[in-house]
Image (tube, rainbow, N blue to C red):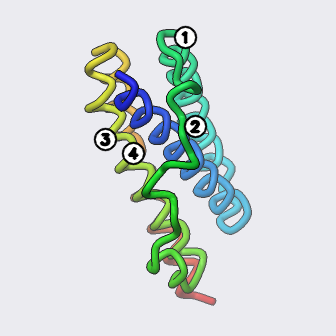
Amino acid sequence: MHRLLRIIDVNLNRSQEGLRVCEDIVRFVLNDRKMVRSFKSLRHKLGALAKRIYRKSSFLKSRNVKRDVGKLTTYREGKRKNIGDVFRANIQRVKESLRVLEETSKLLDRRISQSFKTIRFRVYELEKKSRIKLETILHHR
């Protein structure tokens, strides 16, 4: 159970952090109030799910940052050229972490797993809208 809790904990953090980066990009680059609200809403939904999961188990006791073998920055992270690259990397991180949450949380609560799936599909829709608008703005500068 300890290992499962570590997987869920890191992916909750990863997905919320990635959504925050995307939210700030649509806020300060796109100036799109509706998209900001959408990203913020998803981030808050994840926060609510996290609270439900954290009440069920002791995740913080499972966290072990010092011994995490995957915490180093990868080469690709240093190769981003513009804000579009930052957005794409973070939205991808969100989608991947939501999939991990969907799969692993099935072992704790199937309803919570379904909620992660619902959020993941909303992220797919929001990604499409955001990236089209972002790429349009970036290519016209």
Q: Position of residue 104 (x, y in %)?
A: 29, 30
Q: CA distance from mark 4 to mark 2?
A: 13 Å
Look at discs 4 and 2 and give the one toward the viewer. 4
Residue at disc 2, secondary structure: helix
User: Circle 4: is it few (<14), some (14-19), or many (20+) Cα within 10 Å?
Assistant: many
Corner quadrant of residue 137: bottom right
Taking the spot 42% from the left edge, 27% from the top edge, the residue there is 5
Taking the spot 51% from the left edge, 47% from the top edge, the residue there is 14
The front one of 54 and 129 is 54
Task: Establish if 23 lies above or below 37.
Answer: below
Q: Give amino acid for label 3.
A: Arg
Q: Are marks 3 and 4 in contact (CB under 8 Å)?
A: yes
Q: Position of residue 110 (x, y in %)?
A: 28, 15
Taking the spot 48% from the left edge, 17% from the top edge, the residue there is 53
Q: Position of residue 47 (x, y in %)?
A: 58, 28
Residue under pointer 1: 55
Q: Give amino acid for label 2.
A: Arg
Residue at disc 4, secondary structure: helix
Residue under pointer 3: 99
Residue under pointer 2: 43
User: Circle 2: is it few (<14), some (14-19), or many (20+) Cα within 10 Å?
Assistant: many
